[in-house]
Image (cartoon, rainbow, N blue to C red):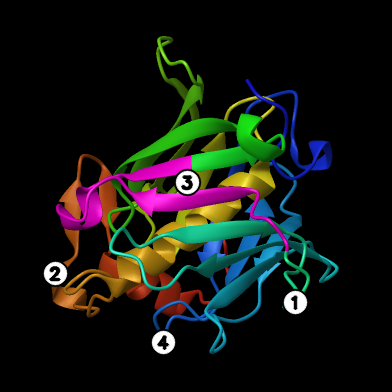
Amino acid sequence: MEQPVISEEYCSDTERELTVRKTSLFAQGDGFAVYDHCTGELAFRVDMYPSVSGELVLMDPGGKPVLTVRKKRPSLHNRWEGFAGERVDGQNQKPLFTVRRSSIFGGDRAGMVVEVHGGVGPTEAETEYRIEGSFSQRCCKVLFEGTAPKGEAALLVAEIKRKVDPDAHVVMGKDVFSLFLAPHVDAAFIMGLVLVLDQVCSDEPGIGEEEIDLSSATLAGDHHVIPNGGTLLEEHPAEVVM
């Protein structure tokens, strides 16, 4: 694995699970709260959606900016850039990484390419990641492809999955999901990718918002699937399964 993209403090020597929760159930993503699955402590937060500038700021629990992502316009490939801390206009900050669609076709399942920038000048090296799957279905993977020249097999470094309540055997709605991280993976960097995926997904026609239909709750194995949170989130709005 490469060095941390943001900071070593956001890495763990062991596998880690984060619980990601949208902080509003009534609008298409007003913000996020991210909790450590084992301790239940707040790890990151995003207080609001982008301003006119199209920027989102990932913060630590105390409100300190950790990472800023912004959409680069215009861009056919829905290109986003990530900056350390809080991006300030006029300071000519270089992005730490760039995220773009691998194709302008294919909608939510088209996949994304992530380039992490390093070095300076014409010899600047780029480390590449690949995102596969469907974020709208909360089922996708982040794969590390290493530094050019390529040749080694891609390494799974993070995975987004639907959140399951182990006691009630209930699959949570899409406003609450799990983010699994491999050892030594920069959690702040991966959360930056989650913010981008959420924005790209919400931009797609017909993808993102779903109406809550309490009559359409179905069964998947022994798990009750409740669309968009269903009765579980409505009856227990303050409960978050860690």
Q: Secondary structure at mark 4?
A: loop
The amino acid on which the numbered mark 4 sits, given as a three-letter code, is Phe
In the rendered structure, find residue 5 and report the number of the disc placed on it.
Answer: none
In the rendered structure, find residue 26 and report the number of the disc placed on it.
Answer: 4
In the image, what residue occupies the spot 40% across and 10% down?
A: 151
Q: Position of residue 152 (x, y in %)?
A: 43, 10
- Mark 2 or 4: in front is 4
In the image, what residue occupies the spot 36% across and 65% down?
A: 200
Instruction: Write down the region rendered in magenta.
Output: 93-114
Q: CA distance from mark 1 to mark 2?
A: 51 Å
The amino acid on which the numbered mark 1 sits, given as a three-letter code, is Gly
Residue 242 at least partly seen: no
In the rendered structure, find residue 167 and report the number of the disc placed on it.
Answer: 3
Q: Which residue is mark 1?
A: 90
Disc 1 + disc 4, Cβ < 8 Å: no
Q: CA distance from mark 2 to mark 4?
A: 19 Å
Q: CA distance from mark 2 to mark 3?
A: 22 Å
In the rendered structure, find residue 216 and report the number of the disc placed on it.
Answer: 2
Quadrant of residue 48 within the rendered picture: bottom right
